[in-house]
Amino acid sequence: MTNYDIGIDLGTTSIIIAVADEGVILNESSVVAYDTRKNKVLAVGDAALAMVGRTPSYISAIRPLKDGVISNHTLTKELISSFVKKVYNARMMKPRVAVCVPAAITGIESDAVVEAVVSAGARQVFLIDEPIAAALGSGLDILQPDGRMIVDIGGGTTDIAVISLGGKVLSAGLAVAGNTFDEELIKFVRQKFSVAVGQRTIETLKKEVACCPQKDFSASMETKGRSLITGLPQKITITTQDLYEPILPLVEQISTVAHQVLEKTPPELAGDIYRNGIMLTGGGSKLQGLPEYLSEQLKVKVELSPDPINCVALGTAKCLSMGEQLESGFVNATPRLGR
Ligand SMILES: Nc1ncnc2c1ncn2[C@@H]1O[C@H](COP(=O)(O)OP(=O)(O)OP(=O)(O)O)[C@@H](O)[C@H]1O
Ligand SMILES: [Mg+2]
């Protein structure tokens, strides 16, 4: 029945669905467009993302998961239901579903997620912690008595965990992640160039131009925005070197928390991590030069996951076939709903 095991990464930025034997089958933005006059959902996913910043006042394009927590239950359910139904409809059997939920969400919030998955047609629902899923999806054998450290930099949160014997030994999180980089870059460009630029342009700048100084990389991008002085459209050229200023304090914060986790790690496991290195996962970890920067700060080898964006969904789908072997961070949530 493994064909019907589905893994869902319910992320702040995107919702990614994977099937154990097939890989990723859906990747859409975690956005819902809502008509406040008619109290009706107009679009979900990428279709809703295309509306961000372009809607009339009565339509809101909302990210129902914000900073790693569920800020709008109803719309989160809408988001899950529509994509899960879309995936199920293509299949005959009711699937078993594992969902990776943000680490900071509460029991009540995760109940709402489980309910949405069940009402969309799941036979059983399991919840898995993001670092465990990220490690599995990055191809790490986490069942061995061998310490592994995962740093998952998503859109809303960065989760850092030490894993051994299929369970989480210790973990920490911070609200500095991909979205924070975007916000800080927007502020920086306003201050330094007196130009207001849109969120999408900034995200492209982050992906294509920004870099930590440890890496020998240099790029520039001609960016269009609105001058804060004249109010008219203006072109500016932004370089990698310009962006060191806003990027460095952010990567420093991530490094500090990773350092604190290493300090608290029991010596045997710390030794393992020294040997195995740290695995970076999540879209935010694709920032140029980040492995080199963290490696220099933490004096440990740092490696980027083979598939940083999809590894959580892939690992979530995979965990269903190895459920009993996972010590913690993996629970059958179906009984909560009295099934
Ligand atoms: N090449 C890149 N360089 C820098 N950042 C990137 C790159 N590609 C994607 N990102 C960033 O990764 C973030 C999304 O990562 P991911 O898909 O792992 O988040 P998520 O799982 O939805 O969020 P969370 O785990 O916090 O709920 C976005 O902020 C995006 O801008
Ligand atoms: Mg994530």
Image (spheres, helix red, strand yellow):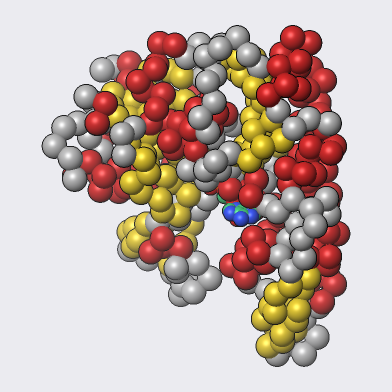
Q: Is residue 258 left or right of residue 147?
A: right
Q: Is residue 173 left or right of residue 70?
A: right
Q: How many marks?
A: 0
**Is residue 152 in view?**
yes
Q: Is residue 210 left or right of residue 309?
A: right
- Image coords of residue 165 (percent x, y): 56, 11
Q: Within the image, what quadrant is residue 306 found in?
A: top right
Residue sitting at x 49%, y 74%: 54
- Image coords of residue 24 (percent x, y): 37, 44
Q: Within the image, what quadrant is residue 185 found in?
A: bottom right
Image quadrant holding the N terminus, namely: top left
- Image coords of residue 109 (percent x, y): 47, 32
Give above or below for 32 relative to 3. Answer: below
- Image coords of residue 224 (percent x, y): 67, 81
Q: Extreme left residue here?
A: 92
Judge by depth and name the residue closer to the eye, 156 or 299. Answer: 299
Residue sitting at x 71%, y 65%: 209
